[in-house]
Image: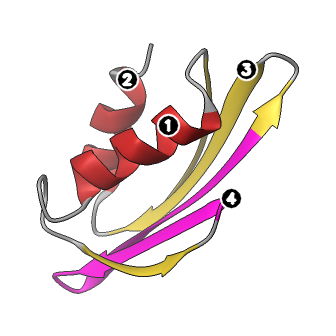
Amino acid sequence: MINLEVETKLSVEEASKRLKSFFGKGGLGLDIVEETTECLNFAGSGGFVNAVICPAEGKTKIELQSQEWEIQVKEFASNLS
């Protein structure tokens, strides 16, 4: 299990879009099991990825929690601009 927090210059909307693209149907193929303006929860292949997205002083903070998708979470976080 991994808990990771990253900050990005992306807007909340763009961060959400990238999360869906990377972890969702067009990417790793996980199902979105919950979606709100601040939260995206994905599940599939026996694991999950939960993301909380919020604005933070001109940036966007993304808190990621995952089980079985740790490597992919680290990859996603390392590719944020």
Residue visible at 37% across and 23% down?
78
Between label 2 and label 3, give the one nearer the viewer: 3
Secondary structure state at the residue bearing disc 2:
helix
Between label 2 and label 4, give the one nearer the viewer: 4
Secondary structure state at the residue bearing disc 3:
strand
- Percent across and percent down for residue 20 are 33, 54
| Residue 42 within the segment the image draws in magenta | yes
The kind of residue on which mark 2 rests is Ser
Instruction: Report the Cα–Cα distance between label 2 and label 3.
Output: 16 Å
Sooner in the amino-acid sequence: mark 1 or mark 2? 1
Residue visible at 62% across and 64% down?
39
Q: Residues within 10 Å of mark 3 (few under 14, many from 20)?
A: some
Instruction: Report the Cα–Cα distance between label 3 and label 4.
Output: 14 Å
Q: Which residues are magenta?
A: 37-54
* Tag shown at residue 59: 3
- Percent across and percent down for residue 35 are 53, 73
Instruction: Report the Cα–Cα distance between label 1 and label 4.
Output: 10 Å
In this figure, which residue is indicated by the disc labeled 2?
78
